[in-house]
Image: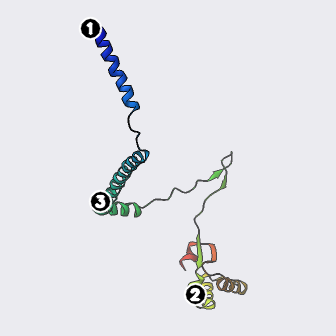
Amino acid sequence: MIRALRHHWFRRRDNRRTSAIHQAPVDPRLTLKRRTIVAAIVVACWAGVIESRLVYLQVIDHADLVARAERQQKQTIRPPAKRGEILDRRGRVLATSMDVDTIYAMPSAIADEAALVAQLCGALADCTVKERGELTERLRRQRHFAYVRRQVSPEEARR
């Protein structure tokens, strides 16, 4: 009886081997087609998730995001403190920062340079003829920005 079981077991094992050998070959085109379909489904699901997130952000959560953007863009930023004095090893001041005013003009917005120069020199009260000529020429040459005078006192800047 044991012999019969062994024989039966070996015969079934041999049948499996022979059945695997005698099976019809798998068509590689069919395998490729199945894999392509699976990949397309995965990509479509991924794109659907991204599109749903974009719709949520742009349609549903739009008002909250606009309010956030306005808060960020209209934030007041305080400039850093003024630079301190530079001292030597004995404590004497070598360099210091000073606030000064500068007077400038936008030549593209000026119609009559000579009249403007006359008004400026009247307000500054210390223009020479040479300075008037140089300023008129500078306003005629430059188009966007021209310095009239740098480092003026607060009183001159007010006038």
Q: Amino acid at mark 1?
A: Met
Residue 22's x, y, as percent?
39, 33
Work out which quarter of the rendered image holds the C terminus and state it: bottom right
Residues 156 and 13: in front is: 13
* Residue linked to disc 2: 110
What SS does tag 1 mark?
Answer: loop
Is tag 2's residue or tag 3's residue first in the polypeptide sequence? 3
Say which residue appears at 32% left-offset and 14% top-offset: 7
Numbered badge on residue 1: 1
Q: Amino acid at mark 3?
A: Asp
Give left or right: position of 151 versus 57.
right
Say which residue appears at 64% left-offset and 84% top-offset: 139
Q: Quadrant of residue 141?
A: bottom right
Residues 6 and 77: in front is: 6
Give left or right: position of 80 versus 6.
right
Around disc 2, counting alpha carbons within 10 Å, would you say few (fewer than 14), some (14 to 19), or many (20 or more)?
some
What SS does tag 2 mark?
Answer: loop
Q: Nearer the viewer, mark 1 or mark 3?
A: 1
Numbered badge on residue 141: none
* Residue linked to disc 3: 61
Q: Amino acid at mark 2?
A: Ile
Tell me the distance, in whole angstroms, between the alpha carbons under discs 1 and 2: 120 Å
Residue 98's x, y, as percent?
60, 62
What SS does tag 3 mark?
Answer: loop
**Pointers 1 and 2 in contact (C-beta within 8 Å):** no
